[in-house]
Image: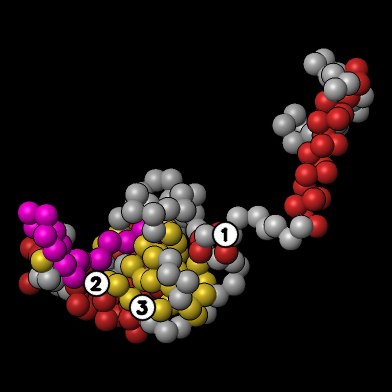
Amino acid sequence: MDQETGGPREKTDLRSAPGFRRRSIPAVLLGTVLIFSGVLSGSKAPSQTASEALDLGKPVAVQRVIDGDTVELSNGERVRYLGIDAPEMRRKVRGRWVEKAEPFAAEAYELNRRWVEGRRVRLEMDRETRDRYHRLLAYVFVNDHLVNAELITSGYVVVRLHPPNLRYADLFMKLQAEALAHQRGLWASESRNLNP
């Protein structure tokens, strides 16, 4: 089947195709010779970056937790959790980093650390795979637990949806409504005015 049209593929004789030139055969042969000579001489393709080497189907180790919604993997990649936003452990003020945590930042960090630090996690991507800071964007699983969802359930993070990454949007909104109804974490009545 032709993937574009959905119909059967038509057989095409390249020699009769418009724009075919007999001199293109020597060019193809020359390219083939160059490829094989590179293989025989031991030259390699450029090395892969850490993200290209990351097999998303296999668990990967979390080296450290940066905050309530960001971790660093053992290969050096940073992963930003999709669909959530945790209070910040630090922030920039007039171009300088200030180590003044927002309310519930320490709790979000600690819960995330207990879930993933030093453990192997499985990453699930959505439509966009990187943010503007070049971090991987992912849903993070420990065994069958979706850590993004666990953090929402705790009440220490808020749902932040960024289309087109909406795979778990309905679930996340439901869990946030439950955290609000049960006044968990930053949804507690005395801390509502601190809600980001």
Quarter of the rendering containing residue 117 = bottom left
Q: Dot 2, how many residues are within 10 Å of its Cα: few (below 14), some (14-19), or many (20+)?
A: many
Kindly identify which numbered label has been placed on residue 117. none
Q: Which residue is mark 2?
A: 156
Q: Which residue is mark 3?
A: 64
Give the residue displayed 68% in from the left and 58% down from the top: 44
Q: Are marks 2 and 3 in contact (CB under 8 Å)?
A: no
Give the colour scheme of this rendering.
Answer: secondary structure
Under mark 1, the amino acid is: Gln
Point out residue 45 in the picture as x, y percentages from the top left corner: 65, 55
Q: Give me the C-alpha separation between circle 3 and circle 1.
A: 23 Å
Q: Which residue is mark 1?
A: 48
Quarter of the rendering containing residue 177 = bottom left
Q: Is residue 74 magenta?
A: no
> Compared to 118, does 60 lie above or below?
above
Give the mark nearer the N terminus: 3 vs 1: 1
Point out residue 72 in the picture as x, y percentages from the top left corner: 38, 71
Classify mark 1: helix, strand or loop. Answer: loop
Quarter of the rendering containing residue 1 = top right
Give the residue displayed 42% in from the left and 69% down from the top: 76
Instruction: Report the mark closest to the observer, 2 or 1.
Output: 1
Instruction: Report the mark closest to the observer, 2 or 3.
Output: 3
Under mark 2, the amino acid is: Tyr
Classify mark 2: helix, strand or loop. Answer: loop
Q: Are marks 2 and 1 in contact (CB under 8 Å)?
A: no
Point out residue 64 in the picture as x, y percentages from the top left corner: 36, 78
Give the residue displayed 76% in from the left and 57% down from the top: 41
Instruction: Report the mark closest to the observer, 3 or 1.
Output: 1
> Compared to 102, does 132 lie above or below?
above
Q: Which residues are magenta?
A: 82-97
Under mark 3, the amino acid is: Arg
